[in-house]
Image (cartoon, rainbow, N blue to C red):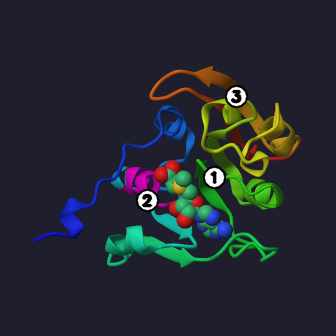
Amino acid sequence: MPGESDRTVLPPSGWVVKHGGMIPPGGEVLDVACGSGRHGRFFRSLGHPVVMLDRDISQVADMASDDDVEIVAQDLEGGRPWPLAGRQFAGVIVVNYLHRPMLPALVASVQPGGALIYDTFAVGNEAYGWPSNPDYLLHREELLIAVRPELVVMAFEDVEETEPRPAVRQRIMAVRPKRSV
Ligand SMILES: C[S@@+](CC[C@H](N)C(=O)[O-])C[C@H]1O[C@@H](n2cnc3c(N)ncnc32)[C@H](O)[C@@H]1O
């Protein structure tokens, strides 16, 4: 029957797979602007409870019957408040999405011992096409500046790459110390 089984979900970002092991086992993972849910699905397959957040949750509707999946439909832009205020997660995942005013809320959403894993397009990508809107392109070192000093940076890159297509991307994996010093 056409429909569910025809849905193609891309594999998770290599950066997320590479650093996903930094998220405490069994800890709750938030997939921000989850789209098809490829990252939440990846962490769910590893046994993590997940929260799937997007303004369009149609692509993750099939996950709704799982007791360890929470689906939150929310437009994150237009000055709306962060919908998960006061909650923290073992992992916060953001891939191919940027809404600058939300960066402080993302950092605050990482629990002690937890990790933020972020991977999206950066300035310079406009030479290659979508996305070219400066609002969707990270400035040089912007993720480093956004997470410090609250989180400790474990890995960072700002790279021009050719595969799977030419793009300029910035990536970070940063953790919140278990105790402040
Ligand atoms: C390029 S997709 C990335 C999806 C997913 N993170 C991934 O890597 O496969 C961008 C996602 O951001 C979501 N999005 C765009 N604007 C949004 C907004 N204002 N509020 C909430 N989600 C939004 C879209 O619905 C879409 O699912």
Label 1: few (<14), some (14–19) or many (≥20) C-alpha neighbours in 10 Å:
some
Q: Where is residue 13 in the image (x, y as percent from the top left)?
A: 48, 39
Looking at the picture, how far across and down is residue 79, in whole percent?
82, 74
Of the residues tagged 1 and 2, which is closer to the observer?
Answer: 1
Q: Mark 1 points at which residue?
A: 97
Q: Which of marks 1 and 2 is nearer the N terminus?
A: 2
- The residue wearing badge 3 is 156
Query: Residue 139 or 131: which is nearer the viewer?
Result: 131
Check mark 1 vs ligand 1: CB closer than 8 Å? yes or no.
yes
Q: Residues in magenta? A: 33-44
Mark 1–mark 2 Cα distance, whole angstroms, equals 13 Å
Q: Is mark 2 on a helix, strand or loop?
A: loop
Residue 43 falls inside the magenta stretch: yes
Spatial CA span between label 1 and label 3 = 17 Å
Helix, strand or loop under label 1: loop
Q: Which amino acid does label 1 sit on?
A: Tyr
In the rendering, which numbered label is found on residue 129? Answer: none
Residue 57 lies in magenta, yes or no?
no
How far from the left and from the top, in percent, is residue 178?
A: 74, 47
**Mark 3: C-beta under 8 Å from nearest atom of ligand 1:** no
Of tags 1 and 3, the one toward the viewer is 1
